[in-house]
Image (tube, grey):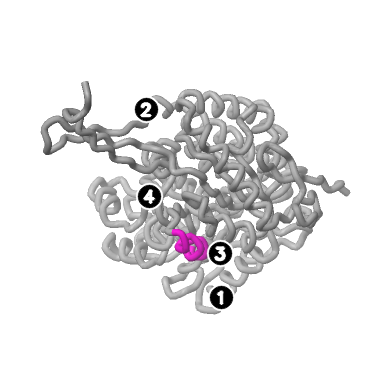
Amino acid sequence: MKIAVKYQMFIDGEFLDSSSKETMKVYNPATEEVISNVPKGTVEDARRAIDAAALAQKTWAKLPAIERAKYLKNLAKGIRDNTEHLARTISEEMGKTISLAEVEVNFTADYIEYTAEWARRYEGEIIQSDRQGENIFLFKQPIGVIAGILPWNFPFFLIARKAAPALLTGNTIVLKPSGESPNNAIEFAKIVEATGIPKGVINFVTGSGSVIGKELASNPKIGMVSLTGSYNAGAEVMREAAQNITKVSLELGGKAPAIVMDDADIELAVNSIIASRIINSGQVCNCAERVYVHNDIAEKFCERITEEMKKVKHGNPLTQTNIDMGPIINKNSLDNINSLVQDALAMGAKLLTGGKRVETIGYHYEPTVLINTNNNMRIMKEEIFGPVLPIATFKDLDEAIELANDCEYGLTSSIYTQNLDNAMRASNELNFGETYINRENFEAIQGFHAGWKKSGIGGADGKHGLEEYLQTHVVYLQYNNLKK
């Protein structure tokens, strides 16, 4: 049996226990064993981190952006130097396959390096004045202290997605990792310490969302709250942030539709949709959550996708190397997945493969395909967050777009077609922040990852994601009145 590791929070450049001395247990979802104990932070701990970040921000913002970028580049190097250890940490606490965990670690370093390259590129404006002898300057300035509330499914990468643009643009940050997967965040903090980033610039406070998350969202010293999580968590952050009219940036749930037209390359569609469904055991907000396939090819498509889903291998990522996915994060999530499947079957859906929990240690669910589903079923409305693929049919593109848009969420979508008219109509008529055409659902760091409707506010990545962490300051300079 593994001996549980004891971790500490990282506040103002120091590793600390909670002021209450209380801890939380962290479990390996593949084995159900306790693997670590982390501090159960208090409001006092959160405020100490916020105060440290506020003090550090004054000096940090005065550094030239290129100097801040040097710290980021060193941080990326430190991450790459510890890839194997970090990947195993991520895999152990949230069940990700080692190969995917390594991708996450390296992608995190890529993201930090990419963000550092913006040091000489983000800029303000000079605006034409109506007055003689006046210039109008629009400066882009940091917001101040950022609060970053992290999810458990891509816990390491989301640190970079929030912290890298915040730091580059002169902000400081307080991060709250998920209680399901906080270990990687403390390992990240160790690299921060070794890199020599000034004290207070990056802080990690572990604890519950109802305590730490609430304080981060409601504290008047916070300039922006960036959360990646569920719709309910996002709505709660908005309520708390409203007290101070604090800016929020929210990436919330998704229910991505995949439309397969009658002229689609079926093999491409099958492989891409499976890749988008089983990645991270289906626990990704932008992966394909429901499929709409044209009547004329439905039988062939369903046969092929079922054949391929049956080949998907699952197991313990730390002991089995030739697997495609690991466990579900916890028992509550596992039970919710099974509830959605059973509800669909009770309403007339047909099971082609899977459909139940794997009877073994850990929270494993079989790769599952359901047909005869429709938009009245919970499984087509609610986020599954597991390796389950519900399939419905349609007669033409008008119906497919209508079915796809019949959803509270609006994060990602996809279409498989060889027809340019179909592709362009989908691009213009699907009510989602992203649409993927003839490829799997996975965003680029230079793009813009943003949801519509209940999938969020604001966004991340690229130029537009960087600007989320900036505010404008307009200066009117009447220079012909100045002393010469």
Q: Nearer the viewer, mark 3 or mark 2?
A: 2
Q: Secondary structure at mark 2?
A: loop
Kindly report the distance in space between the C-alpha atoms of the residues bearing marks 2 and 1: 52 Å
> Which circle's residue, 3 or 2, is located before the other in the chain?
2
**346 displayed left or right of 10:** left
Q: State the image quarter where residue 5 is shown.
A: top right
CA distance for labels 4 and 2: 25 Å
Please report whichever mark, 3 or 4, sits nearer to the chain's N-terminal start. Answer: 3
Q: In the rendered image, which residue does mark 4 sit on?
A: 434
Q: Name the mark nearer the viewer: 1 or 3.
A: 1
**In 3D space, how far apart are the residues under numbered discs 4 and 1 (Cα atoms)?**
29 Å
The C terminus lies in quadrant: top left
Please state the horizontal and vertical placement of residue 269, each as a whole percent of the image.
43, 49
Q: CA distance from mark 3 to mark 2?
A: 52 Å
Would you name the residue on which mark 3 appears? 352
CA neighbours of label 3 inside 10 A, class few (<14), some (14 to 19), many (20+): some
CA gap, disc 3 and disc 4: 30 Å
Number of the front mark, 4 or 1: 4
Q: Which residue is mark 2?
A: 121
> Which residue is label 1 attached to?
343
Disc 4 is placed on an element classified as strand
Identify the magenta region: 235-244
Which SS type dominates the magenta stretch? helix
Q: Amino acid at mark 4?
A: Glu
Q: Secondary structure at mark 3?
A: strand
Residue visible at 41% across and 44% down in the picture:
468
Query: What is the three-letter code of the residue carrying label 3?
Result: Leu
Q: Is residue 327 visible?
A: no
As displayed, is residue 172 above or below residue 389?
Answer: above
